Image: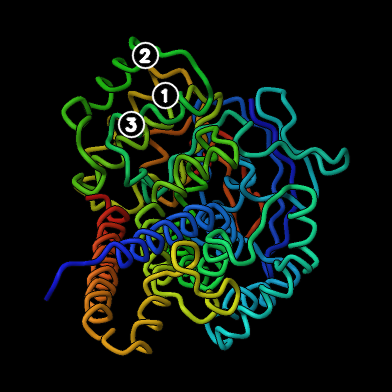
Amino acid sequence: MLRVDVEKKLGEFSLEASFTSEGRVTGLFGASGSGKTSLVNMIAGLLRPDRGTIAIDGDVVDDTAAGIHVPTYRRRIGYVFQDARLFPHLNVAQNLDYGRRMNGLAADPAQQKRIVDLLDIGALLDRRPGKLSGGERQRVALGRALLAKPRLLLLDEPLGALDEARKLEILPYLVRLRDEANVPMVYVSHDVAELRQLATQIVMLKQGKVTSFGGVKVLA
Amino acid sequence: MSEITPAEWTAILLSLRVAVIATLVATPFGIALAWLLARRDFWGKSMIDALVHLPLVLPPVVTGYLLLLTFGRRGLVGGFLADYLGIVFAFRWTGAALACGIMSFPLLVRPMRLSIEAIDRRLEQAAETLGAAPWKVFATVTLPLALPGVLAGMVLGFAKAIGEFGATITFVSNIPGETQTISSAIYSLIQTPDGDAAAGRLVIISIILALGALIAAEWFARRATARLHGN
């Protein structure tokens, strides 16, 4: 469960968002400049709200009144960025293993194999990120985030940098993740079709305000 | 050209020892400072930046004299170190290493700073979302990606240290076997009648060392670029 009730001023722009989501995939929908990425960055702890609270699974990670701000690295979240942000000095296998190492988790070859198979990246393990296509990079980034065993996965327009054909290549993997990976997700997009396929709940943002909240039908 | 004499070898080996120690001791400070200058904003930052670059523009004899005043036996720091820790810099090879370290510091820091500035901070953010505490982000992402720049800075600093003359001779004089480096040996030789051949040999060695260092620095810089592009 994700509970968000925050305010943040960024220059001229002000963001006010309040919602509680129980869905497996919470779709954050809005045009560019509506504050989607800022909101996700606040959930990730990369941006600090001016006022308000954020709770992940009942665990309060931000509460400005109580002076609580859990740093990003202790939030146990996964974050898939639009630009995969793989570590260029590590190969795919090392990138995938990074979160496990940083969190001091025991090796889990079964889980590793499951995710690698789910995302079809077994053939890429020895390669460097510079030698991957955009779609491959994004699949590896998904795997890397999942293998850190997050309790919430944030995806900020993960298909945004890909062309139509690549989008169609990745979308089925995301659907499989939703149905099989058992991690709640926040999925940011300005693409109605994408959200229709993936989201179970929608938070609609317009110029920094939540304008509607509910099932996928609010997209209509 | 004739053989290198034992006295010349002494100067060459001393120069190498001085430059190696100066570079190795300066490197951790250089990395820390490069990171601070590249990644943090704090009060007095431009002041520190200027201070680091000062040896580059100050007459070396001034730097040497200031070192003598500070680290000499009667100097504020030098007196303390000699009395309580038994560390003496004045007229010792360690003093030559200190002078070379300070004179080469701006050249050592610069490539390190540039390479840290060139790292995409979004990669560090990604590491943090994967559970890496700030020092782990530095150790596993920042430092490895900056490594070619760090090595380039070390090479340049080393090259500068091995050629340093003005501050060294002012601070620790020109004592054969203790503080006489290649540069001060050349200086002595060209003031001696018949010293030309020996001076010539040391000049050639200086050129080889400097060229080698520049080529190495260039190579590391190219590696850095390749690394950042993930090849």
N-terminal of the pair, mark 3 or mark 2, is 3
The disc labelled 1 sits on which kind of residue? Leu
Q: Residue at x 37, y 72 (%)?
A: B182
Left or right position of B158 against A37: left
Query: Number of numbered discs present?
Result: 3
Do marks 2 and 1 share a subunit? yes
Q: Disc 2 marks which residue?
A: A111
Q: Chain of mark 1?
A: A
Residue B139 x %, y %: 49, 41
Q: Quadrant of the N terminus of chain A?
A: top right
Residue A201 x %, y %: 53, 33
N-terminal of the pair, mark 3 or mark 1, is 3
Asked if the residue at tag 1 contacts the one at tag 2, i.e. Cβ–Cβ closer than 8 Å, the answer is yes
Q: Residue at x 69, y 47 (%)?
A: A17
Check the image and report above or below for B218 versus A60.
below
Q: Residue furthest front?
A: B193
Left or right position of B42 against B25: right
Residue B207 x %, y %: 25, 76
Q: Nearer the viewer, residue A95 or A132?
A: A95
Is residue A220 visible in the rendered image? The answer is: no
Q: Disc 3 marks which residue?
A: A94
Q: Which mark is residue A147?
A: 1
Q: Assign a secondary structure to mark 2.
A: helix
Q: Nearer the viewer, residue B146 or B121?
A: B146
Asked if the residue at tag 1 contacts the one at tag 3, i.e. Cβ–Cβ closer than 8 Å, the answer is no
Instruction: Check disc 2: other Cα within 10 Å, few if <14, some if 14-19, many if 20+.
Output: few
Left or right position of B34 against B229: right
Asked if the residue at tag 2 contacts the one at tag 3, i.e. Cβ–Cβ closer than 8 Å, the answer is no
